[in-house]
Every structure is written in C-alpha cells, then in structure tokens.
C-alpha cells in the first residue's frame, strides 16, 4: 500500500474517533476508490486489522 494511502486511512481513523465522520469519509473515500485491485486488497486487510483505530476513545 502506498504511504499516502496509509496516511489517509490513519487520518480518517483519527477524525472518526473525534466524531468528524464526514471529514473522515472525504479523506478516505477518494483513496479507496482510486486503488487498484492489489491495493484494494491491502486496504481491506488494513481496515480489518485496524478497526479498533476508528473507535478507540469514542
């Protein structure tokens, strides 16, 4: 996965934890849509492994 994609997902998780879901989606959605099939698989795996990142402290 590209560093820019990982950074966008991490930022989206941070925003989600801070109840800023609309902003989180605005950051994450474009990178998810632009991903090719290989990166999509990596994104899916990352999201599964980091689901708690989106809810910690909420």
Image (cartoon, grey):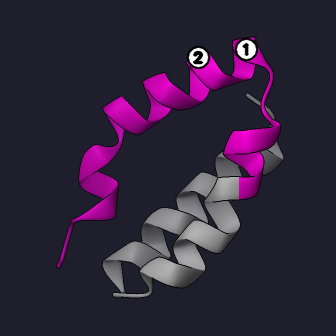
Circle 2 SS class: helix
In the displayed structure, 18 sits above or below 33; it is below
Marks 2 & 1, CB-CB < 8 Å contact: yes
Q: Which residue lies most toward the bottom here?
A: 19
In the displayed structure, 45 sits above or below 6; it is above
Does 7 sit left or right of 25 as displayed?
A: right
Q: Nearer the viewer, residue 21 or 6?
A: 21
Does 14 sit left or right of 58 as displayed?
A: right
What range of the chain is rendered magenta?
30-58
Main secondary structure along the magenta-highlighted residues:
helix
Which quadrant holds residue 49? top left
In percent of the image, x 66 and y 72: which residue is there?
26
Q: Determine which of the numbered discs, if any, sits on residue 37 in the image.
A: 1
In percent of the image, x 46 and y 73: which residue is there?
14
Which quadrant holds residue 53? bottom left
In the displayed structure, 36 sits above or below 6; it is above
Residue topped by disc 2: 41
Which quadrant holds residue 37? top right
Crowd rating for badge 1 (residues with CA inside 10 Å; few <14, some 14–19, many 20+):
few
In percent of the image, x 73 and y 27: which residue is there?
1
Q: CA distance from mark 2 to mark 1?
A: 6 Å
């Amino acid at each position: 996965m590209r560093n820019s994609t990982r950074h966008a997902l991490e930022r989206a998780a941070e925003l989600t934890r801070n109840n800023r879901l609309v902003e989180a989606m605005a950051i994450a959605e474009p990178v998810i849509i632009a991903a090719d099939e290989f990166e999509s698989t990596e994104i899916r795996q990352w999201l599964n492994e980091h689901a708690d990142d989106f809810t910690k402290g909420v």
